[in-house]
Image: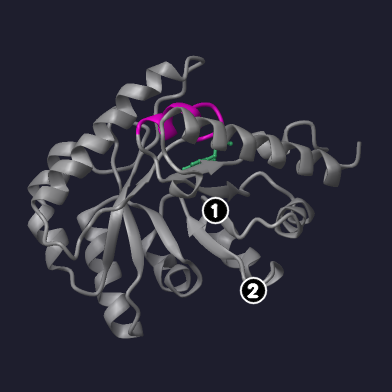
């Protein structure tokens, strides 16, 4: 099978699984957005995804994102889902629709200053390290709660929600607890925020655990490897 038809099949199958998970959790299919993660994909595969109708793409490395934006159709919206170094922030702010991975107060302040300078109001999510694994980026729950008034004071930024990754596991049910805790943290922070900060988005769920994430209230799933299964 050509890589084009393999990707088409994988994509169709993924959409069905997302739809079924929405149905099971009594949520409309429109409540969950798919971001196709392209960090392991060749540029031709990314172009195939765009031909199939995918319009939201995610990269984890800022450099690769910056390099790929001009190669891919302009109507595509890009998401940065990995750690952002401050020296890449200016280019990234000018290229992306949503940053999922803002992981420190220092980075927030730097983005706020840059946004002011560039007269942008970037949309972003705050990454939370719910599981507390030392290899993961992200705010701890306590840190985010403690700094919440500072977050709210940065007027050039639009904080739209939270993002997290579950620990790697063969059993997606282990991820459920992490996703639930992220949702509860979001609810708690939303209570302490003005109505203009709705924290609508929960970016959670990858190839191995997106169905559980949807059942726990995910609004954005970030999926890579399932799309390229069997593609050479
Ligand atoms: C790579 C990556 C994904 C996609 O992971 P898959 O398991 O390939 O679906 C999602 N989120 C982040 C932050 C990633 O780095």
User: Does residue 81 appear to the left or right of 8 in the view shown?
Assistant: left
Residue 2 found in image quarter: top right
Camera-nearest residue between 219 and 179: 219
User: Does residue 50 appear to the left or right of 64 in the view shown?
Assistant: right
Viewport quadrant of the C terminus = top right
Q: Position of residue 90 (x, y in %)?
A: 41, 73
Kindly tell me whether mark 1's CB lies below 8 Å from ligand 1: yes
Residue under numbered circle 1: 58
Label 1 to label 2, Cα distance in Å? 15 Å
Comes first in the chain, label 1 or label 2:
1
User: Does residue 219 appear to the left or right of 113 in the view shown?
Assistant: right
Label 1 CA crowd tier, 10 Å (few <14, some 14–19, many 20+): many
What range of the chain is rendered magenta?
206-216
Q: Position of residue 197 (x, y in %)?
A: 20, 61
Residue 12 painted magenta = no
Q: Position of residue 41 (x, y in %)?
A: 70, 47
């Amino acid at each position: 099978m050509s890589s084009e038809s393999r990707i088409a099949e994988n994509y169709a199958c993924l959409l069905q699984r997302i739809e079924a998970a929405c149905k099971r959790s009594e949520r409309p299919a429109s409540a969950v957005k798919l971001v196709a993660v392209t960090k392991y994909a060749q540029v031709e595969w990314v172009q195939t995804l765009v031909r199939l109708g995918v319009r939201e793409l995610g990269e984890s490395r800022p450099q690769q994102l910056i390099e790929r934006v001009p190669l891919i159709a302009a109507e595509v919206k890009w998401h940065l889902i990995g750690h952002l170094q401050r020296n890449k922030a200016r280019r990234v702010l000018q290229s992306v629709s949503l940053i999922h991975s803002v992981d420190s107060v220092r980075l927030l302040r730097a983005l706020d200053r840059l946004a002011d300078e560039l007269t942008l109001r970037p949309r972003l999510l705050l990454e939370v390290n719910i599981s507390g694994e030392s290899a993961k980026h992200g705010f701890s729950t306590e840190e985010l709660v403690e700094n919440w008034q500072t977050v709210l004071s940065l007027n050039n930024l639009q904080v739209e929600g939270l993002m997290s990754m579950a620990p790697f596991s063969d059993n997606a049910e282990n991820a459920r607890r992490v996703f639930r805790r992220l949702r509860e943290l979001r609810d708690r922070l939303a209570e302490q925020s003005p109505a203009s900060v709705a924290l609508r988005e929960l970016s959670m769920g990858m190839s191995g655990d997106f169905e559980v994430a949807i059942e726990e209230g995910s609004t954005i799933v970030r999926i890579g490897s399932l799309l390229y299964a069997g593609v050479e």
